[in-house]
Image (cartoon, helix red, strand yellow):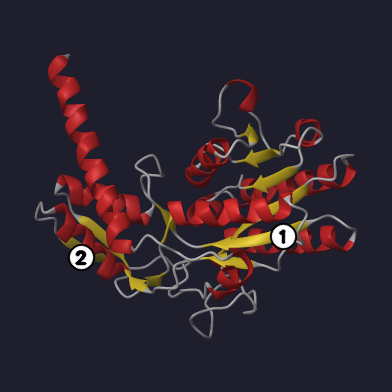
């Protein structure tokens, strides 16, 4: 029987890519997102809507969230209501549905705060340092509680996913890529801050593998990383972007934000062992694609202006 899978946050970076990948495999995808139009438009904070939607599906990939650390700092109540309250609605609806859908919850490397040991494994202590990270930790606790009452639920942790020009413009990778494509200045908030940048294509492959496991009735895995396992400083990222842009972009150093984690890269070996997954898109390749995509988009926009 063909699976019907709900993707919350379906219009976001990962949600858009995952929707396309699952549809290409013949999966019946139900979408739910604040930014969507028509039947797919909806808010995970709307308990009645979530229950009605979940009642019609066999599995759920829960991506919907206030997804930026800085947004969580600016509006903690909205962050908590969406990231915790929205997930609670999804888990409650799944537990009450006669179809007994599985749930895959997208968490974040922010749950670790500043790991003592790197690369961080999934067993590292959860010590978040900002509102967004704390909301994701609480979400993971909700998943554990749902498992205890019989729900087939699991958690995946993502890290600095990138790869699309439609991503939030102020996220570090698209911000650097766009500036480099246009020859603009790249501002680096913390030159030595180090992160694990993972291409959206790789994350999508991991999530597809997970949905296949769960749809086939396999046991929900313990928390797993979809990460590259490769550390890159922001200075290295900016330097690489400027080189790929070939427009002479300058790099300006600025002070880091006090609510940001300074260093993280993760161990991807559990995902490899449990799902046969491994990252394929190297940072250089993914960033080059993005710089070129921004350059092409800028050229097309200029051409449209000429036509007008």
Which residue is located at x 40 percent, y 63 percent? 197
Q: Position of residue 120 (x, y in %)?
A: 54, 78
Residue 68 in sight here: no
Residue in view at x 50 percent, y 56 percent: 203
Residue pointed to by mark 1: 154
Secondary structure at badge 2 equals helix
Displayed quadrant of residue 3:
top right
| Viewer-nearest residue: 27 or 240 | 27
| Image label count | 2
Q: Earlier in the sequence, mark 2 or mark 1?
A: 1
Residue sitting nearer the eye, 60 or 66 = 60
Judged from this view, the residue extending furthest toward the bottom is 117
Residue 239 shows which numbered tag? 2
Quarter of the view holding residue 231: bottom left
Residue at 56% of width from left, 70% of height from top?
272
What is the distance, in whole Å, between disc 2 and disc 1 at their CAs?
A: 37 Å
- Callout 1: 10 Å neighbours few (<14), some, many (20+)? many
């Amino acid at each position: 029987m063909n699976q019907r899978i709900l993707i919350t946050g379906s219009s976001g970076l990962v949600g858009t890519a995952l929707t396309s990948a699952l549809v290409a495999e013949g999966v019946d995808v139900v979408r739910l997102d604040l930014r969507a139009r028509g039947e797919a438009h909806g808010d995970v904070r709307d308990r009645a809507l979530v229950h009605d939607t979940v009642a019609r599906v066999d599995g759920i990939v829960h991506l919907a969230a206030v997804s930026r650390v800085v947004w969580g700092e600016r509006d903690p109540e909205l962050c908590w209501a969406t990231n915790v309250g929205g997930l609670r609605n999804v888990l409650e609806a799944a537990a009450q549905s006669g179809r007994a859908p599985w749930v895959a919850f997208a968490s974040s490397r922010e749950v670790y705060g500043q790991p003592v040991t790197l690369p961080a494994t999934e067993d590292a202590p959860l010590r978040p340092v900002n509102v967004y990270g704390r909301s994701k930790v609480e979400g993971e606790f909700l998943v554990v509680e749902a498992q205890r009452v019989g729900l087939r639920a699991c958690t995946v942790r993502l890290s600095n996913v990138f790869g699309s020009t439609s991503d939030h413009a102020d996220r570090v990778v698209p911000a650097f890529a766009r500036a480099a494509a246009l020859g603009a200045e790249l501002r680096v908030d913390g030159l030595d801050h180090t992160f694990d940048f993972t291409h959206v294509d790789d994350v999508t492959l991991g999530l597809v593998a997970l949905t296949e496991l769960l749809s086939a009735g396999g046991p929900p895995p313990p928390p797993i990383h979809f990460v590259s396992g490769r550390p890159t400083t922001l200075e290295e990222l900016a330097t690489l972007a400027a080189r790929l842009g070939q427009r002479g972009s300058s790099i300006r150093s600025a002070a880091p934000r006090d609510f940001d984690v300074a260093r993280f890269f993760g161990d991807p070996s559990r995902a490899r062992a449990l799902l046969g997954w491994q990252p394929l898109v190297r940072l250089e390749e993914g960033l080059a694609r993005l710089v070129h995509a921004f350059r092409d988009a800028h050229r097309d926009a200029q051409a449209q202006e000429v036509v007008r």
